Image (cartoon, rainbow, N blue to C red):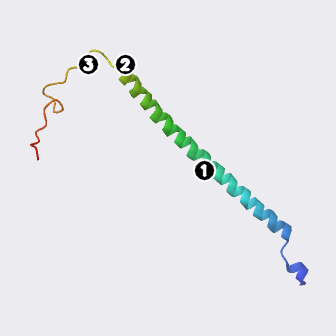
Amino acid sequence: MTATNAAPDPVAAAEKRWQDLLDRIHDLEARVAATTSTATAALDTHLARLDALRHHLAQPTWPLPAPDPVSPQAAAPNNPPA
């Protein structure tokens, strides 16, 4: 076997490196797309909740309901001053 026959083909090695890089870029694009769609869905959910709260605060139902006197939230806290 001569040195010429034993040496690896530089063109094939370069093509393999490029293909590996392209595969990694494709995987990265897929991960970015998945993460972006998840983040966008979460933002949409939060923005819808904020819009509903804004609408509720801007146009509350009138008259406002009176607090229930037996409700624990309506009772004064039973915390002596420290």
Label 1, label 3: how many angstroms apart (C-alpha)?
A: 49 Å
Q: Residue at x 56, y 46 (%)?
A: 35
Distance between the Cα atoms at labels 3 and 2? Answer: 11 Å
Dot 1 falls on a residue whose secondary structure is: helix
Image coordinates of residue 62 in percent, x first then y, are 29, 15
Q: Quadrant of residue 40?
A: top right
Q: Quick one: which residue is furthest to the top in this view?
A: 63
Query: Which of labels 1 and 2 is toward the front?
Result: 2
Residue situated in front as seen by the camera: 5 or 33: 33
Q: Secondary structure at mark 3?
A: loop
At x 68% / y 57%, what residue is drawn?
A: 24
Three-letter amino acid code of the residue under disc 2: Gln
> Is residue 77 shown left or right of residue 62?
left
Q: Are marks 1 and 3 in contact (CB under 8 Å)?
A: no
Of the residues under marks 1 and 3, which one precedes in the sequence?
1
Give the SS element for disc 2.
loop
Q: Residues within 10 Å of mark 1 (few under 14, many from 20)?
A: few
Q: Position of residue 78 (x, y in %)?
A: 10, 39
Residue type (three-letter) at the residue carrying disc 1:
Arg
Instruction: Kindly identify which residue carries mark 1.
Output: 31
Residue position marked by numbered label 3 in the rendering? 64
Q: Quadrant of the N terminus?
A: bottom right
Q: Mark 2 packing: few (<14 Cα in 10 Å), some, or many (20+)?
A: few
Q: Nearer the viewer, residue 64 or 1?
A: 64
Q: Amino acid at mark 3?
A: Leu
Between 77 and 20, the one lying in front of the other is 77
Which residue position holds label 2? 59
Image location (x, y in percent) of residue 71: 16, 29
